Image (cartoon, rainbow, N blue to C red):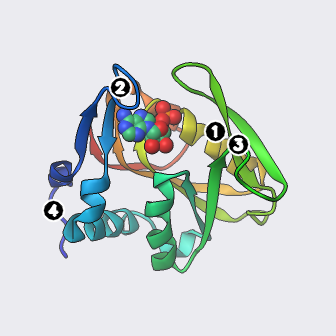
Amino acid sequence: MPFEPNHDWLKEHIRDIPDFPKPGVAFKDITPLLANKKAFSYTIDAIAHEFDRDQIDKVLGIEARGFIIAAPLAYRFTAGLIPVRKAGKLPWDVESEEYILEYGTDLLEIHRDAINPGERILIVDDVLATGGTAVATATLTERCGGKVAGVATIMELSFLGGREKLAAYDFLSLVSY
Ligand code: AMP
């Protein structure tokens, strides 16, 4: 399917849920996008189009919605797939990185042996908000010996300034709020 001049039509398939999971948060629900065959395949194709498959060894998905985007991209690139998970979910030796939430902090983890030295890693998630999650994931990637080939999301919440925190990386978001 050909690409549109911009990807804003995808917003028709992204649902705003006010006050979820807590008061004051406008949650961006991508389940309508995932359920729509045109929107989902377009999303994967549009991200894949922006990166050179020969420059990516593994695609890393951030729990949980990042997994859904990362898996078809990895398949498409014939790349490996790496999950980054919340604390305590991964069964083997992990590297951990703390990141800041709206209230307090949490940990993200990656298996220590997920990345071979010098491998080029594309980091994928659904939403870039403050950027804390993506920065922590990039830090984990580098600590494991990987090189961040790029960070890709379906959308960014630009008023939260996450993109600026990722200035050192090649960052893509298909749509912006
Ligand atoms: P942040 O670390 O602030 O960039 O938050 C990004 C992570 O939190 C991603 O894994 C998103 O899935 C999730 N997230 C943050 N804000 C929202 C939102 N408004 N709607 C949906 N997911 C969000």
Report the amino acid beneath label 1: Ala
- Discs 3, 4 touching: Cβ within 8 Å: no
- In the picture of the structure, the residue carrying the numbered disc 4 is 4
For image coordinates 55% across by 19% down, the residue present is 103
> Where residue 85 appears, x then y in whole percent?
64, 50
Residue behind label 2 places its C-beta within 8 angstroms of ligand 1: yes
Q: Mark 4 belongs to which amino acid?
A: Glu
Please indicate whether residue 111 sits to the left or right of residue 167 in the image: right
| Residue picked out by circle 3 | 87
Label 2, residues with CA under 10 Å away: few <14, some 14-19, many ≥20: few
Q: Could you say which quadrant of the image residue 31 lies in? A: bottom left
Residue 53: % across, % down = 49, 74
Instruction: Name which residue type carries label 3.
Output: Ala
Note whether ligand 1 is within 8 Å of mark 1.
yes
Instruction: State the image quarter where residue 25 is shown.
Output: top left
- Which residue was labeled with disc 1? 136
Depth order, front residue of 18/111: 18
The crowding category of the residue bearing disc 1, from other C-alpha atoms within 10 Å (few below 14, some 14 to 19, many at least 20), is some
Residue at 39% x, 68% y: name it. Answer: 48
Q: Which mark is residue 25?
A: 2
User: Which element carries disc 4, helix, strand or loop?
Assistant: loop
Q: Which secondary structure, mark 1?
A: helix
Name the quarter showing ligand 1: top left
Q: Which residue is drawn at 19% across and 48% down?
A: 11
Q: Is residue 175 above or below residue 49?
A: above
Measure how far apart labels 1 and 4 are at the Cα level.
32 Å
- Viewer-nearest of labels 1 and 3? 3
Q: Residue at x 48, y 50 (%)?
A: 170
